[in-house]
Amino acid sequence: MRKTRIILFLAACLLAAASLSAQGGKEAGSDQLTIRFYYPIGTAGDLANAMNALCAQYSEENPDVDVEPIYAGDYVQTMQRTLTSSKAGNPADIALLTSADVWTAVDEGIIIPLQPLIDAEGEGFLDRFFPGMLYDAKVADEFYAIPFQKSTPIFYYNKDMFREAGLDPEKAPETWEELAEYAAILTTDDRYGLEIPIDQWLPSIFILQNGGEINNVEGTETYLDSPEAIEAIEYLLGLVEKGYMPAKRLFGDSSSDFVAGKTAMMYNSTGSLAFVRDSASFDWGVGFLPAGKERIVTTGGGQFVICSGLSDEHVQAAWDFIKWMTEPAQTAKWSMASGFIAVNPAAFGLPEMVEYTDALPQAIVARDQLQYAIGEPPKTHDAREVSQAMASMFESILAGNISPEEGMKELQASCSGILAEYR
């Protein structure tokens, strides 16, 4: 049994009692069906209230169904709780999981394939989603999820600093070459020219933009020691060695540094748009991620899944709720409340979204960049364990602890070992 499964199983044991206390189904003496929905967000505050309001609206419009939204913590904790309730024989009806955890949920047998439900909707049902957001809904090219809480990384820059440095404030760097040039110009004694948070997400984009691959469609092989992958990490290391960016920052660190004027440019999630809007005291802009050999961006965030072991009645109620949540009005409400990108293109034509994007035009840049979007890597079995191995090695290379070539070969060997049982 792989380490990831052991960790999730231990967490499941610790949480089992709590899960068993919440029983779904129909209330005694009532025809109302209750469906439980586990969801993650970064905080249990205003966004939890926004999610509760959406679920309450659905229940009001559909009085035969009561949706019980259950804030389950972050993405890892939500996966743990989803596994717990399923293994205890008391599954939730719906959960919102990352791409990595969708793969794990399939391997654990705790969610159902959604293709039969999609097919029953008739041709064109998936047209309600941006195509680039559908990659993360698949496991080995089969649909097990539906996109909802989605983000991509975008490029943020300080227009005032651009003006002071003689750069065009309306033009973000378009290529890796321009990115390095701008970073050199904008780096000073008291600020970095650029910050790129280090986990597996952003360095993977550099590999993909350089013509490399992360893994195969079946999720059984990685290609992290390819010349393209090594060259991409060498590029990032060069930015660090020249002093243009720090070796390690996290997403929250970089957002805080950006609004404090400690960095002139940064890669960060679309989820940081609202924070930057509310916190920056300077003129700022966003652009597409600078291109390497190709222009590629990956998506991130959560997808709806339906748990296994449910009655047909519960499955249909869960599916109806997912369809309702991905209609234009609901995706617009969630986008405006959370900063995630509305997954339904039609949402952007609603009057309230037009007003929102007029006030925050940077959100349109995030939407338009989706034409270059693919799914969040890695898309493999044991994806969370592979992700952790990738993030740890990228950090070690940028810290100067190991060369890119040696490090990426070591990483590839590690990932091959993780995935050996699936080949």
Image (spheres, rainbow, N blue to C red):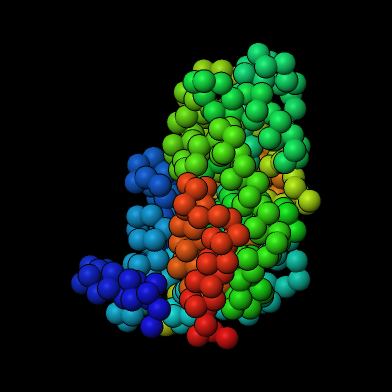
Viewer-side residue, 292 vs 124: 292
Seen at 69% across and 28% down, the residue is: 182
Viewer-side residue, 213 vs 410: 410
Query: From this viewpoint, is residue 212 visible?
Result: yes
Q: Is residue 68 above or below residue 340?
A: below
| 356 relative position to 281: left or right | right
Q: How many marks?
A: 0
Q: Is residue 250 above or below residue 133?
A: above
Viewer-side residue, 192 vs 32: 192
Quadrant housing residue 406: bottom right
Instruction: Tell me residue 204's x, y (percent).
Output: 61, 56
Viewer-side residue, 239 vs 338: 239
Q: Is residue 87 above or below residue 280?
A: below
Seen at 62% across and 42% down, the residue is: 238
Please identify the residue farthest to the right as the structure is shown. 293
Instruction: Tell me residue 119's x, y (percent).
Output: 68, 76
| 61 relative position to 225: left or right | left
Please identify the residue farthest to the top as the structure is shown. 164
| 105 relative position to 136: left or right | left
Seen at 72% across and 16% down, the residue is: 166
Seen at 63% across and 78% down, the residue is: 218
Q: Quadrant of the C terminus?
A: bottom right
| 345 relative position to 26: left or right | right
Instruction: Tell me residue 199's x, y (percent).
Output: 50, 52
Instruction: Tell me residue 150's x, y (percent).
Output: 57, 52
Q: Is residue 185 above or below residue 287?
A: above
Query: From this viewpoint, is residue 35 visible?
Result: no
Q: Quadrant of the N terminus?
A: bottom left
